Image (tube, rainbow, N blue to C red):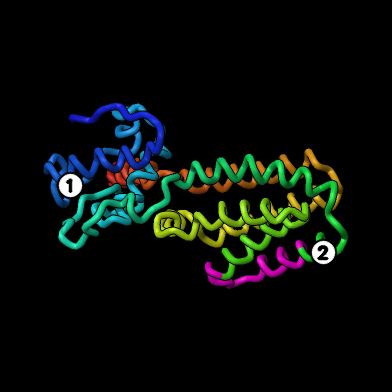
Amino acid sequence: MPLAVVESPRLYRQIADQLRHLIDRHEFPVGSRLPAERELAEKLGVSRPSVREALIALEVEGRVRIRMGSGVYVVDSVHAAARHIGADLPAEGPFEVLEARRLVEGAVSAEAATRASPEQLAGLAGLLDQMEQPGLPAERLIALDRAFHVEIAAMLGNTLLVRCVGELFDQRMSPYFRRLAQYFENEESWRAAAREHRAVHAALAGGDGEAARAAMRVHLQASQERFSQSFGEVDVKRAGERQRRHARTK
């Protein structure tokens, strides 16, 4: 397969460009299944999350269709956007954004633990109470999630940091991040996020800067891991095992 090793910066865009080029050359014809993430990552010399970012980009563009539990398939590009994905999506992929948030918001949380007022902590707890209400739509959960992170930055009284944290969070509003969330966010993931938020709040309330830093970094690392699940390779393997067991019992 004529794939060349890619290097930074903007790995996911370079990967998407290579795969798009191969699709256009009919190396991967319409209806065919792309190689598994693991195989693509090995051939390209990149991480699997970088491959996953590229595949999401191509799906938003209309070049492929991701079928959870099955794989990634090339679709007819007649209805795909005329311009390349780079014109519509942020330069940074979601994993790069989450890493930046982990570093920035970890430091912000450590400082906030030494400055938070009782009123601010009570307001933060109120946001968490709302977030834990059952049956909330995704849009409301995202708004509450954003408010939680921005309110922690506001504890420092620095409008530039508030804007920085808010703008980093708003990267998830892109079509690209929304598509990624569509596959990996659900009630269970939001419950996990709420527990992680509670741990951050407890550290802030205790005035423990290092615990607050650690809790925020754990939360954002867990967010990255939730988005790092396979698009079905494990499911395919398990499905094959189930089929073999079923055949043996016949």
Q: Amino acid at mark 1?
A: Ser
Q: Residue at x 35, y 27 (%)?
A: 45
Tell me whether the residue at label 2 lies in contact with that at label 1, contact meaning CB atoms closer than 8 angstroms.
no
Membership of 38 in magenta stretch? no
Relative to 133, is 72 on the left or the right?
A: left
Residue 249 appears in the rendering: no
Q: Which residues are magenta?
A: 124-139
Residue 79 appears in the rendering: yes
Q: Is residue 246 above or below residue 189?
A: above
Residues packed near mark 1 inside 10 Å, few (<14), some (14 to 19) or many (20 plus): some
Relative to 219, is 179 on the left or the right?
A: left
N-terminal of the pair, mark 2 or mark 1, is 1
The local secondary structure at tag 1 comes to: loop
Q: Amino acid at mark 2?
A: Ala
Q: Residue at x 69, y 54 (%)?
A: 197
Membership of 135 in magenta stretch? yes
The local secondary structure at tag 2 comes to: helix
Residues packed near mark 2 inside 10 Å, few (<14), some (14 to 19) or many (20 plus): some
Q: Is residue 217 above or below residue 152?
A: above
Q: Which residue is mark 2?
A: 122
Q: Which residue is mark 1?
A: 32
- Mark 2 vs mark 1, foreground winner is 2
